[in-house]
Amino acid sequence: MSETALIGIDLGGTNCRAALLAESGEILRSNRIPTRVAEGREQFLSRLFELCDDLLSFAENEKRCVLAVGMGAAGVIAEGGVVTVSPNVAWLDGFPLAETMAKGLRLPVTVVNDANAVAWGEAKFGAGRDFASFLTITLGTGVGGGLVLERRLWKGSDGAAGEIGHFVVDPGGRPCKCGSRGCLERYASATGMVCSVIELLEQGKASVLKMLPPAELTAFEISRAARSGDAVALRALQEAGERLGQVLASVANLLNLDGVVICGGPSASLDLLRPWLEAEMRFRTFAIPFKRMQIVRGELGDEAGIVGAATLAYEAVMG
Ligand SMILES: [Zn+2]
């Protein structure tokens, strides 16, 4: 066997995706299984091992030697790959995920927080490759954050850093599942944007979005309506952009970063968010950090987490 490969896994509350990658970050084969949280841990792990076996067989046929496995999961991940707290997969709480996977696969396994995996993917192969210090913000169901300082992931003392989604933008605002109120993610996530639209529709504002069944009211539809000039959709994006700009002003003032990389589905609307985001930042940020911090869109899309987790696993093996 001459060439090497890595396995990257992104464990989400709904789906678990896995891929075989070359060291260059190129994806050679990818697959997914439903997570099915209700089935419990043992069932899930046996299906996950099958998924990995398929990738390992593929690697063997391609005469590639798999060096390590990297896995991104939501929540607080302690050193050694123990999941301290998992917000959407309860049976992972306190579970030694890395050790269990390593025993089952007979390979070195690294487990990292999913937002940190995204940050490292973009740092190595994506929009963060030219930044020494930057923040990734992933807009999805919530808002995740991953901080890279001088080309190193900043995970915090307990692996709990980066929770940019819970910066307060309105102290008495919308309740958040974290127990606080008015957190950024209640306005700037895909879910937050939908919430803004529902509030406006309830006030009787006219919008093409009123025609959609509730299940089809998504950030994608809001973006589409905004592009055709729909006032309600534009107002929801303005809310998201302004709140994001307020938080990024504080981030710039605190950390004087080179850049911010915006990831996740709604990042496709960055051009629409940007005028409001930049207006808030210009108003609230000191001139020097404002001038320095570039706001760009992620380049790796859905694959950022898988690529980042695999790369962190590789680096752990290579020292
Ligand atoms: Zn919160």
Image: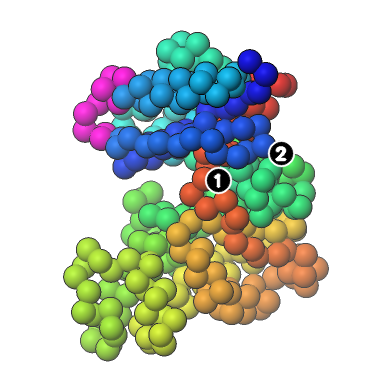
Q: Which element type, helix, strand or loop, lies under badge 1?
A: helix
The stretch in magenta equals 36-46
**Disc 2 element:** strand
Residue 188 visible in rendering? yes
Q: In the displayed structure, would residue 206 be above or below residue 282?
A: below
Report whether 258 appears left or right of 48.
Answer: right
Question: Which residue lies most toward the right here?
Answer: 288
Which residue is found at the position 46% from the left and 11% from the top? 103
Q: Quadrant of the N terminus?
A: top right
| Count of picture labels | 2
> Which mark is drawn over residue 152?
2
Query: Residue 221 location, x and y as percent?
Result: 34, 71
Answer whether residue 173 is visible to the viewer in this image.
Answer: no
| Residue 92 circle label | none
Name the residue tied to disc 1. 304
Residue 109 horizontal side relative to residue 73, left or right: right
Label whose residue precedes the other's in the sequence (2 or 1): 2
Give, as a three-letter code, the residue at label 1.
Ala
Quarter residue 230 falls in: bottom left
- Horizontal side of 251 relative to 213 (left or right) equals right
User: At 68% across and 52% down in the image, what residue appears?
Assistant: 128
In three-dimensional space, the C-alpha distance between marks 2 and 1, rounded to whole angstroms, equals: 17 Å
Quarter of the image containing the C terminus? top right
Question: Residue 123: image x %, image y %?
Answer: 67, 46
- Residue 124, compared with residue 44, is above or below; it is below
**Residue 63 found in image quarter:** top right
Mark 1 surroundings within 10 Å by alpha-carbon count, few (fewer than 14), some (14 through 19), many (20 or more): many
Above or below: residue 122 compared with residue 208: above
Given the image, on which type of amino acid does mark 2 rest?
Arg
